[in-house]
Image (cartoon, rainbow, N blue to C red):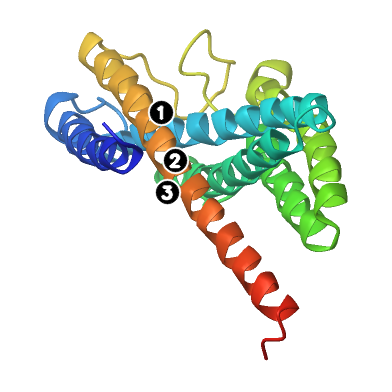
Amino acid sequence: MDRSKALTTLDIVTGLLMAGATAMVFFYAPLEAVMGEVQKVFYFHVAAGWVGMLSFLVAAACGVIYLVSARKDPLKAVYWDRVAVAAVEIGMVFAFINIVTGAIWARPIWNTWWTWDPRLTTATIMELVYAAYLMLRQGIDDPEKRARFGAVYAIIGFMSVPFTFFSIRIFRTIHPIVIGTNEAGAMGAFDMTPKMAQTFIVSLVVFSVLFVDVLWHRIRLAALADKVEQLKLQWESQGGE
């Protein structure tokens, strides 16, 4: 199977899995006794956050691979830089979805769309860290220098990810720890039933597949953009106007 057919197949599988996961959320997982319907946001909220953090991990790993391979195999290094950028862009989208769905969940539970809780604050800082990554790249014209600086930044910036994840375990917070023991006073905490846990796990797996699918598309788009840029430079070097 060639790449285009494989990607098309993955698109179809991802669509079916997303439909199945959504059906589980609304028709299989039971209503939470206290929060009711709004608790169902949880499955998308956590899964989106997972994909955001996974994306930033991929970007950091690609940064390491780029720095190692830059001198040995420049062409391969360019590919890993491309993957890192794609992963950061996708991570920012899903991290933003995580923040927005968190606000939707928080409104009826905390009676506010936003509070400077440690988890919310660190998640926002993480988002801004990677926004700065994209701004840094935009400000550097030299491709090799841009890729090198981007790789180093992606590695260092990843420190914001575990800090965000463990923030609700390090600090006293009203944000619930659904997996594990909750802090006293955590608002919105609940115990998952077996059906809830099954739906939660399926959501994480399906969103992970979605990440692979979107990442593949983004890498493919970046490769096409590079080809267009090369053709443009070639045309200009031949006296095109």
Above-or-below relation of 85 to 227: above
Q: Which mark is residue 104?
A: 3
Q: Quadrant of the N terminus?
A: top left
**Place of residue 104 in the rendered image (x, y in percent of width and height, measured from the top left):** 42, 49
Which residue type carries mark 2?
Trp
How busy is the neighbourhood of tag 2: few (under 14 within 10 Å), some, or many (20 plus)? some
Ranked by sequence position, the earlier of labels 1 and 3 is 3
Q: Is residue 149 left or right of residue 75?
A: right
Above-or-below relation of 126 to 114: above
**Place of residue 196 in the rendered image (x, y in percent of width and height, measured from the top left):** 26, 18
Q: Is residue 157 left or right of residue 62?
A: right
Asked whether 70 or 162 is in front, the reply is 70
Q: Which residue is mark 1?
A: 208
Disc 2 to disc 1, C-alpha distance: 12 Å
Q: Residue furthest front?
A: 238
Mark in front: 2 vs 3? 2
Q: Residue at x 55, y 28 (%)?
A: 54
Q: Which residue is mark 2?
A: 216
- Locate residue 199: give its quadrant: top left
